[in-house]
């Protein structure tokens, strides 16, 4: 019983001492503002935005192929949907710099099979 009390007190003292000397836990800051983003972080973000734009273009192409077969105007306004998708693509284009940036590694483009209309193996 005597050893348990000493052990409990020792553990409590160690925890208090550790809490005193530990640095405060950093708060989650969230995403970097676009004005401050640079380097790899900015490149990754631009890559995601570019892919989103490309996928929206693919979606628009698929929609056009569907409307070539069946007119959906009885259920939706196809022209309005198409213009909304085009507006979103233009918004993404404002985020993306259309000119490739020079870097030590150079610029490498890997086309998406969906954009080329090629089936993946």
Image (spheres, grey):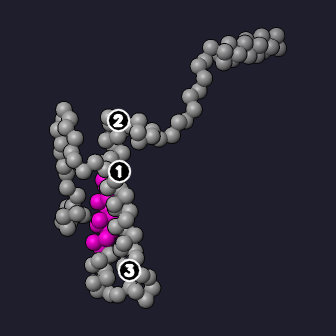
Check the picture and name the quadrant holding the N terminus.
top right
Would you say residue 70 is visible in this rendering? yes
The numbered dot on residue 38 is 2
**Earlier sequence position, callout 3 versus callout 2:** 2
Q: Which residue lies at the image location 29% right of the left edge and 66% below the top edge?
A: 58
Specify the segment rendered in magenta: 48-62
Residue 81, horizontal then vertical, whole percent: 40, 74
Is-magenta flag for residue 91?
no
- Comparing 26 with 13, the one in front is 26
Residue 92 in the figure: left or right of residue 119: right
Residue at the spot of label 1: 95
Residue 7, horizontal then vertical, whole percent: 74, 13
Check the picture and name the quadrant holding the C terminus.
bottom left
Kindly report which numbered mark, 3 or 1, lies closer to the viewer in this rendering: 1
37 versus 111 height, above or below:
above
**Earlier sequence position, callout 3 versus callout 1:** 3
Q: Quadrant of residue 4?
A: top right
């Amino acid at each position: 019983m005597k050893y348990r009390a000493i052990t409990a007190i020792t553990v409590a003292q160690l925890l208090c001492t550790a809490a005193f000397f530990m640095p405060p836990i950093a708060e989650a800051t969230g995403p970097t503002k676009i004005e401050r983003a640079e380097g790899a972080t900015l490149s990754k973000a631009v890559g995601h935005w570019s892919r989103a734009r490309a996928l929206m273009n693919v979606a628009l192409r698929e929609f056009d192929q569907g409307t070539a077969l069946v007119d959906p105007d009885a259920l939706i306004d196809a022209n309005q949907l198409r213009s909304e998708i085009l507006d979103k693509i233009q918004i993404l284009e404002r985020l993306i710099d259309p000119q490739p940036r020079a870097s030590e590694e150079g610029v490498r483009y890997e086309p998406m099979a969906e954009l080329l209309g090629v089936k993946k193996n």
